[in-house]
Image (tube, helix red, strand yellow):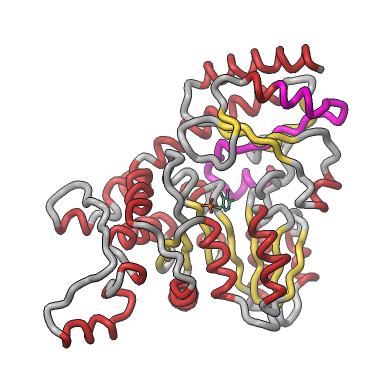
Amino acid sequence: MDIDTRLSHGGRRFAESLNVVNAPPMRQTTRLFPTMDALRDAEEDGFASMVYGRLGNPTVRELEGLHTELEGGFDTVAVASGLAAISGVLFALLDAGDHALFVDNCFGPTRTFASRELPRLGVLTEFFAPDVGAGLADLLKPETKLVFVESPGTGSFEVADVPAIVAAAKEVGTLVVLDNTWATPLFFDAFGHGVDVTIHSGSKYLGGHSDALIGLIGARTKDAWDRVRRRAQLLGGCPGSEEAWLALRGARTLRLRLRQHEASGLAVARWFQEQPTVHSVLHPALPSCPGHEFWRRDFTGAGSLFGVAFKPDVPWSAVDAFCDALELFGIGHSWGGYESLIAARTLTTCPRVARALPTGPVVRIYIGLEAVDDLLTDVDQAMARMSVTA
Ligand SMILES: *Cc1c(COP(=O)(O)O)cnc(C)c1O
């Protein structure tokens, strides 16, 4: 069935059991059983029985089911945030003595966890350039158990050659984990491209309204799901049922919203490309973005989050004046809601990337659901103010 249909009909078994379209969020710690025997049976059944709220909740389970339907994997584990998904997966899949490889342009906290926390647990970590491709083979050691990719990467947006990375990792039996938040399962088929475990921050497009923190871990195989579920649950970071309910609600309109985000995002990105103060627009669907050819080959759409790198002679004060003059863009973190946002970015967390892209200030722009002509009018007037400042 088409994605639009799955988004409308998936994750509704709990609701159907109540004869309603939407089940309310199930607020639950304790589940009661008619007899001691029934409790004992449920405990043996483990996860499936949802014997206690932290171990399973009907609303959360519906979200996990819908996400699995979208991704086509074995199953999903929902957790409290995208970052809980990242740390949960790393905790679940790595042991002392292992070696793990991370893409250089990954999300900041992923980088922090890899470089500061994993070594504390006896895991050796190294970073690789987003354009490594088949060259990953040279970095793999016998003890490399995990390769972590985010494509496009946070901040600098290079698109990686995921199939080449997967092929090199598969050769030596190393698991590939992908943070697929930018593209969502709708725009990048992670499991179809051989990825083993996916990470998705549902706080972004899935929730879609800047009001819920939630994370999803998708597993292609039962073995990966078992390991992740058992250990991620041990960390105790289960999602709230209200958040799971908001993510389920967001899913119903995800495809529709993404279509508009994609079109408006491209229109505004192209506008930036024409500006004399702009060095390059880091939007995976534009040829100016490193790895654009992999986006064209492997993705079926583009998110509306992208970077704008100004020319080296443009001072931060002028860029600040541009951002402050915007009327329709919020200044702040995160993205994926209905409102457009802008935030300052430096590329210094990714030294290799920063070296490869000698530019002035970089801002990260997120295009929401406003009318694109209004957004274009807004960036136009703000750019005029910036030129005065510069
Ligand atoms: C926001 C984000 C995360 C973290 O998600 P939270 O839900 O905020 O914890 C992880 N990866 C990427 C790519 C993100 O943009």
Placement of 148 over or under 18, stated as above or below: below
Asked whether residue 29 is in view, the answer is yes
Image-quadrant location for residue 106: bottom right
At horizontal 36% and vertical 54% (from top left) the residue drawn is: 244
In the image, 68 versus 110, the foreground residue is 110
Where residue 281 appears, as percent x and y from the top left, is 71, 33
Image-quadrant location for residue 194: bottom right
In the image, 219 versus 53, the foreground residue is 53
Image-quadrant location for residue 236: bottom left
Number of numbered discs overlaid on the protein picture? 0
Is 326 on the left-hand or right-hand side of 251? right
Looking at the rendering, in which quadrant would you find the C terminus? top right
At horizontal 33% and vertical 60% (from top left) the residue drawn is: 60
In the image, 252 versus 320, the foreground residue is 320
Placement of 94 over or under 269, stated as above or below: below
Where residue 157 appears, as percent x and y from the top left, is 68, 44
Where residue 103 appears, as percent x and y from the top left, is 71, 59
Where residue 303 appears, as percent x and y from the top left, is 55, 40
Is 127 on the left-hand or right-hand side of 192? right
At horizontal 50% and vertical 40% (from top left) the residue drawn is: 336
Q: Is residue 304 magenta?
A: yes
Which segment did they paint magenta?
A: 293-321
Q: Is residue 167 magenta?
A: no
At horizontal 62% and vertical 47% (from top left) the residue drawn is: 297
Asked whether residue 265 is in view, the answer is no
